[in-house]
Amino acid sequence: MLGLAANIQSQAQASAAVSAAYQYPANTSGDFDGVNDIVICQNSAPAGHVLKPTGAVSLSAHIRPHAWDYQGYSSSFSKAYIAGNIVTGGYALYLEQDGTDTYIKWSVGVADDGTGSPGYLTATSTEPINDNLDGPTSTGPFRWVLGTFDGNTATLWFEGRTTVYGGTTEAGFRIGAANYPGSYPTTIDYTQQGTQVTEFAIGGSVQHGDYIRGNIDDVAVWSSCLAESEIDVLRGVDPFDLRRTDIPGYNSASSLAGFWSFDEGQGLQTADLVGSATGILTNGATWSANNPADGS
């Protein structure tokens, strides 16, 4: 009976979260200093947690790094996490340096049926972001970044596109997709090399650090692979409330596993609007008036 009561209470909490008011235009975002600021989503560590789907996953965020060119960010910079739970397994969106360039990447740790070795699928921008987004020293507006995995293919989307993002400064910015060999049926692995992935985090990695410097808003996880048609619809949706069931062509609201709008603007928590993985602002992570809605 205790287990049943706990389950009923959990369902009630989830229902209350779904019906919570959503303020838009969003008047705040998360602000991260690139030193150790991070948002840790509590209670998301256990195996089987909703934020640890095994068959398919999608991860979305609006990001505004403080200068897309991370060359001037830190002499020790090699990687900066946007969001995820990756360690040796799991999934994450991040920025990574290669020589004098910085790329957006989407990685998923995968396991197979024994015919091959566990590893990572990594989809990456085929051109460096610092050469194609607003110039090397300009922050620019928020950009929508999305990673999807359908059990075989990891695809990175930028502003809802996987080929060319048009515009005078962004022309030629392309996204690559990584395919796992068809002979290896895959699941998402959270325990590669004997290390268990722990909490889902925003702005850095719980296990690796690698903190980002900039603003992050509207982080979402689905336990499904969003279809291209859905992604196209979401590009222009307003309000950007991903729990909505009234968006024609968007059918994945029911698989939304976590959604952090960063609309509180105060305090040390940002609510998970579809569950119980409340984001705890840690090590000085705070709020910014910059947000995707006003283009700042």
Image (spheres, helix red, strand yellow):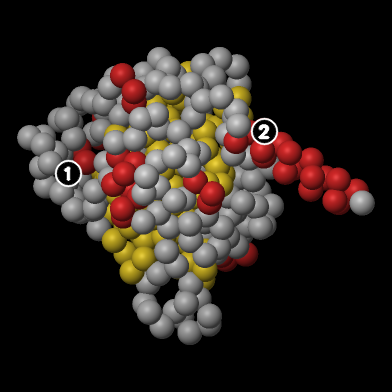
Q: Nearer the viewer, residue 95 or 26?
A: 26
Find residue 165 and name its label: 1
Provide the secondary structure element on which disc 2 rests: helix
Residue at the far left in the pictured view = 168
What residue is shown at x 24% (from left), y 34% (from top)?
69
The 10 Å Cα crowd at callout 1, few under 14, some 14 to 19, many 20 or more, is: some
Front in this rendered view, residue 45 or 26 = 26
Q: Which mark is residue 212?
A: none
Residue 20 percent coordinates (x, y): 60, 28
Which of discs 1 and 2 lies nearer the camera? The answer is 2
Question: Which element type, helix, strand or loop, lies under badge 1?
Answer: loop
Q: Amino acid at mark 2?
A: Ala
Q: Which residue is mark 2?
A: 16
Give residue 289's quadrant in the image: top left
Measure the alpha-carbon separation of dots 1 and 2.
38 Å
Q: Residue furthest right?
A: 1
The reply to whether residue 291 is in sight is yes
